[in-house]
Amino acid sequence: MTSAPFSLELEDALSLEAVGPIPVNEPKLDGNERAYLIDCIDTGWISSEGPYVERFEAAMAERVNRRHGIGVANGSAALDIAVAALRLSPGDEVILPSFTIISCAAAVVRSGANPVVVDCDPTTLNSTTDHYADAITPRTKALMVVHIYGLPVDMDPILTLAEKHGLAVIEDAAEMHGQTYKGRPCGSFGTLSTFSFYPNKLVTAGEGGMVMTDDAELASRCRSLRNLCFNSKQRFVHDELGWNYRLTNMQAALGLAQVEKLDETVARKRAIGATYTDLLSSISGVQLPLTRTDYAEGLYWVYSLILDDSLEMDAKAAMAALAEHKIGTRPFFWPMHLQPVFQKMNLFKGVSCPVAERIAKRGFYVPSGVGITEVQMRRVAAVIQKVLR
Ligand SMILES: *Cc1c(COP(=O)(O)O)cnc(C)c1O
């Protein structure tokens, strides 16, 4: 593959007519998905009571080296349950990145505890031990660690920090199926970890999520929270409030088929990342994802671009230009401390996270789902080159 400028001839071959519109994500459902879903219909097992739920939970637990997996309705539900499982009290603080999805902070707010947000590193986009350490107070009860876009957080020093201060750790591994940190699976760290199975994740169930833990008591509490906290002795009597966050047999059937081919998906994602890096590395003014750190290889859950401050164009303008060429993109996360909903709640007053604020305006990601083809990537790269020239 060449990173030389595209010739006129090649541009023709990569025209919109030749390639067609390119959506930001297309899933690949070419394994046992169909057979397992038909099995759900043939057996009549469609609800959360069906056998695929436990099979999917067991497959994920084995994959990430955890004793327990609790399948739930989505990744946001998994976070709600993981935080609720910690039994936090008003005034307790949970430290988490500002640069993440709202589900993380929402789970903390809904638990009644106080979210404390921190900035992130400009190259890995992850919050680091120093960020967490600086935010610890006597009221801190937990650290929520979120791996962003492709590279895992440097976990070991954070786990040491948590141990030193007696803090729980929730690991949000929603973007990290199949990723490892120093050879250990993401999703295996901390008190509880969570996954999402949204269609753009490396394992999808259409919608779905999972809470993972090694602690049997926490696992049973998570199961109860997922199922409205029905009292095991007297049904329809409740000592606590839970949710109906159950996962259906059909979602689990899809998810199981996806876990079976996770290695293939990881390899494909890394190949997509390498191809984009090859095609885009000659373009100046754009920060591409790090290919590796000393503890992990990039996974490229999404292929992210950050425009240098020297470019006049910001992410919004670049995304609009790509949309004109029928190329789907998504903006970066919008930092939690800038969210109108939290400002109305008087949260995060006076907080500043300059890195998160900058990348939120300068960053976006390009089509990088497992279904993307070589020629689609070439067209995306060619259009980016044209747009940024
Ligand atoms: C996708 C995602 C979630 C939320 O998952 P849903 O299934 O969409 O609710 C949570 N955290 C992170 C980091 C994610 O990327």
Image (cartoon, rainbow, N blue to C red):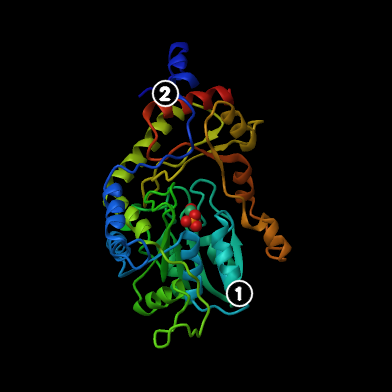
Which residue in the structure is indicated by mark 2? 3
Residue 117 relative to residue 268: left or right = right
As drawn, the label of residue 218 is: none
Distance in Å between CA atoms under marks 2 and 1? 52 Å
Q: Residue at x 38, y 61 (%)?
A: 187
Among the two numbered marks 2 and 1 on one chain, the one whose residue lies closer to the N terminus = 2
Q: Residues within 10 Å of mark 1 (few under 14, many from 20)?
A: some
Q: Residue at x 64, y 50 (%)?
A: 354
Q: Residues within 10 Å of mark 2 (few under 14, many from 20)?
A: some
Callout 2: SS: loop
* Mark 2 and mark 1 residues within 8 Å of each other at the beta carbon: no
Amino acid type, label 1 = Gly
Quadrant in the picture for the C terminus = top right
Q: Can see residue 263?
A: yes
- Looking at the picture, how far across and down is residue 57, in whole percent? 32, 64
Callout 1: SS: loop
Q: Kindly indicate the quadrant of the structure image that contains residue 352.
A: bottom right
Where 199 falls versus 114 (above or below)?
above
Where 349 falls versus 90 (above or below)?
above
Amino acid type, label 2 = Ser
- Looking at the picture, how far across and down is residue 360, in whole percent? 61, 46
| Residue closest to the eye, 152 or 234 | 234
Where 357 falls versus 164 (above or below)?
above
As drawn, the label of residue 112 is: 1
Q: Residue at x 64, y 49 (%)?
A: 357
| Residue closest to the eye, 348 or 354 | 348
- Looking at the picture, how far across and down is residue 44, in whole percent? 31, 61
